[in-house]
Amino acid sequence: MAKLVGKMISLDDPSYRSFLDLPKTETVSRLLLLIVGLGYGAISIASQASYISSFDSGLLQNFLVPAIFIVFGILTAFITKVGMAALLWAGSKALGGTVKYRAISLVTPVALLPGLLGVPHLAGVGNGAWWVSLLLIIGVVWMYLISVKIIQAVQGFTAKKAYLSVMMAFLFLASIYYLIVPAG
């Protein structure tokens, strides 16, 4: 399975369909989501190390507060998966896609893996360093390309139609992000 996910991350077209056809797709999808959530939590712990170390209790410093960050990382990954899958489904539905949300949702955690590259930016690591912004850009572009492959495999769209579908989803996400996140 790790090899198949690696192929998906490297944008190998047939691997997406193979992933959906495997009997353990649901289990692997959940495992990938857990990995993404652990990554979110770990990066949050690293970015908040001084805050965590400010607690007097060793139990709080070494277990409870990091565990809370991990739990919230997993929750964030789940919410991100649900939202991204919904946007991809809606974008493809707008262009005539007939596949149900669940099929797209099963593959969406693969698209979240490169998103881990953008978490340092979101966590405020690096104080605006160029490399943090570069990682964010690489992560978003990679997520976009994986999302296109997902829509092609799941909906059976042509490349052009899949790119347009995912572009609509990402533009909608960007507009919401722009409305919610304060300028500064």
Image: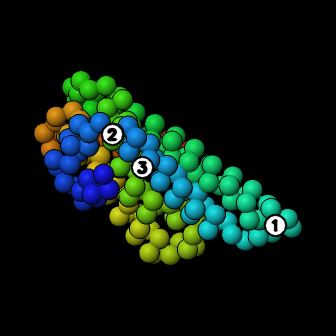
Q: x, y percentage for residue 40?
A: 54, 56
Q: Quadrant of residue 54?
A: bottom right
In the picture, measured across the screen, residue 141 lies left or right of residue 174, that is left
**Which mark is in front, 3 or 2?**
2
The CA distance from mark 3 to mark 1 is: 31 Å
Q: Which residue is mark 3?
A: 32
Disc nearer the start of the sequence (3/2): 2
**Element under disc 1:** helix
- The amino acid at mark 2 is Thr
The answer to whether 29 is drawn above or below residue 135 in the figure is: above
| Left or right: 87, with 62 as reference point | left
First of labels 3, 1 by sequence position: 3
- Pick the front one: 179 or 102: 102
Where residue 182 appears, as percent x and y from the top left, is 59, 52
- Of the two numbered discs 1 and 2 on the same chain, state the one appearing first in sequence: 2
**For the point 42% across and 49% down, which residue is it?**
32
Residue at left 45%, top 75%? 130
Identify the residue at image location x=80%, y=62%. 59
- Amino acid under disc 1: Gly
How many residues crowd around disc 1 within 10 Å: few (fewer than 14), some, or many (20 or more)? Answer: few
Q: Position of residue 41 (x, y in %)?
A: 58, 57
User: Local crowd at mark 3 within 10 Å, few (<14), some, or many (≥20)?
Assistant: many
Q: Residues within 10 Å of mark 2 (few under 14, many from 20)?
A: some
Q: Is residue 105 visible?
A: yes
User: Is residue 8 visible to us here?
Assistant: no
Q: Which residue is mark 1?
A: 58
Label 1, label 2: how far apart the Cα atoms are? 40 Å
Contact, CB < 8 Å: mark 3 with mark 1? no
